[in-house]
Amino acid sequence: MVLTQDGRSDLVFPKHFDGTRFYNPGAPQARGILEGLRWKLTSQPEPSPRFIADVRQSLPPRRVDGSEVRTTLVNHSTVLLQQRGSNILTDPIWSERAGPFSWIGPRRRRPPGVSWDDLPRIDTVLISHNHYDHLDLPTLRRLAARGDSTFIVPARGARLLRSENIGPVHELEWGESLSLPALTVHCVPAQHFSGRGIHDRNRTLWCGYVIECQERLVYFAGDTGFGPHFAQIREKFGSPRLALLPIGAYQPRWFMSAVHMAPDEAVIAHGILGAGTSIAIHHGTFQLTDESLDTPKKELIARAHNESFLVLNNGEFAEIDTQ
């Protein structure tokens, strides 16, 4: 390993594009349509409530000062990260359904933990990939209409946003970075796939992000299976002070393991990263796979035997001191 002048590794992330489509290098690929049909025909989902009205919405401050990172779980993979000088929103979704139209797709089972009217100004919006539960156009249009936000998407993902007059938008490849007034955003690998229709699978990239602000690192994993990229990210950047790691949509394992971590794998990823604190995301709002809505949360609590891996409810926040 060679270190650069700032003490980081010069690791280059592996090739992941064949000229037409992106892929997971040295790792399993997402299952195909026929295997998806097999899953649906044999699915034995755990029972789950149609709607749970147990969310206590919180009122985030307009801005934060000091050295802490205030981290509010809004819902699913939507997290409000507030640091001195910046408000960041990850994979925002306030819609009632995660789908192409308002009447189709998985229906919301819990309300957002922050009401839209209470959302502060958002400086930066990070989109990890183009699945409907992560790239929600109605929410992004509302954010764009405010006129305050810069949008960051993985490679070949900007065209969709620009077609909806959502911007300004910047595309990043794995290993690329974007410097903004208060922070730098680094695009890093994830093990997943992309697509919003029948013919566009893997035409756009998927990713996670390392956010560098005030000499600290926050890692947003996006949507990902367990893989070698966690060790690569730590080697290149060092251990993050805070990591946002997905724990849901993992059953059945024969179908989901290539693209979604189970809670026990998220605990292992937390250790590989050497994260000071991890917070669970991608759970508790949309019923996407066979496990019930709150099974991921219960499984993680049973497996994470220390206080450094937090499970927040929608609307709950944690203040992570980075000093």
Image (cartoon, rainbow, N blue to C red):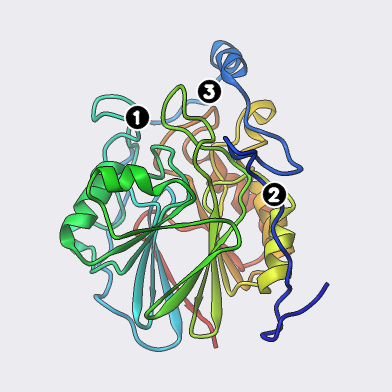
Provide the secondary structure element on which disc 1 rests. Answer: loop
Residue under label 3: 45
Q: Which of marks 2 and 3 is in front?
A: 2
Quadrant housing residue 60: bottom left
**Residue 307 percent location from the top left of the image:** 61, 68
Structural distance between the alpha carbons of marks 3 and 1 = 13 Å
Provide the secondary structure element on which disc 3 rests. Answer: loop
**Amino acid at the residue labelled 3:** Pro
**Amino acid at the residue labelled 1:** Arg
Mark seen at residue 15? 2
Compared with residue 291, is residue 153 higher up or lower down, i.e. above or below?
below
Camera-side residue of 145 and 167? 167
**Amino acid at the residue labelled 2:** Lys
Structural distance between the alpha carbons of marks 2 and 1 = 42 Å
Residue under label 1: 50
Provide the secondary structure element on which disc 2 rests. Answer: loop
Compared with residue 256, is residue 26 higher up or lower down, i.e. above or below?
below
Camera-side residue of 287 and 46? 287
Mark seen at residue 90? none
Identify the mark nearer the N-term, 3 or 1.
3
Quadrant housing residue 314: bottom left
